[in-house]
Image: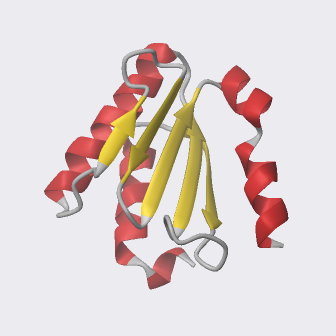
Amino acid sequence: MHDTNPLLSTLLKILDDIQAIDVTVIDVSKHTSITDYMIICSGRSSRHVKAVAAYAMEHMKEAGVPAINHNGLEGGDWALVDFGDFIVHVMQPETRALYNLESLWQERVE
């Protein structure tokens, strides 16, 4: 899946470079018109969550894909970055477990 979309591969490399934890990619293109992929990952702390989101925005912009919108960078509990074809959720592990977005989207995809 990642090999067919070079920008997705770029984004995943960026997340790996900043040490995002437990990166999950869900192809939602057949189920919603708002994006093609939901990328969900964790940060070790609120500071790391903010750093992951900011790093992704900076480096995706360099790759020619600036963020359309972002939310949650102030708090660091859950940061969302919208790149159009990709929506990135960076969460602290407790928040990720509470909202369980993977389960919500994977039920729709299957």
Total tally of numbered discs in the picture: 0
Q: Is residue 2 left or right of residue 59?
A: right
Residue 109 x %, y %: 76, 70
Residue at 42%, 79% in the rendered image: 5
Q: Residue furthest bottom?
A: 4
| Quadrant in the picture for the C terminus | bottom right
- Where 66 sits versus 47, above or below? below
Residue at 32%, 45% in the rendered image: 69
Residue at 48%, 48% in the rendered image: 88
Residue 96 x %, y %: 69, 32
Residue 56 visible? The answer is no
| Front-most of residues 50 and 23 | 50
Q: Is residue 97 left or right of residue 55?
A: right
Residue 47 x %, y %: 42, 15
- Where 65 sits versus 93, above or below? below
| Front-most of residues 98 and 54 | 98
| Quadrant in the picture for the N terminus | bottom right
Residue 70 visible? The answer is yes
Residue at 78%, 51% in the rendered image: 104
- Where 58 sits versus 86, above or below? above
Q: Is residue 100 left or right of residue 1?
A: right
| Front-most of residues 33 and 51 | 33
State the scheme by which the image is colored: secondary structure
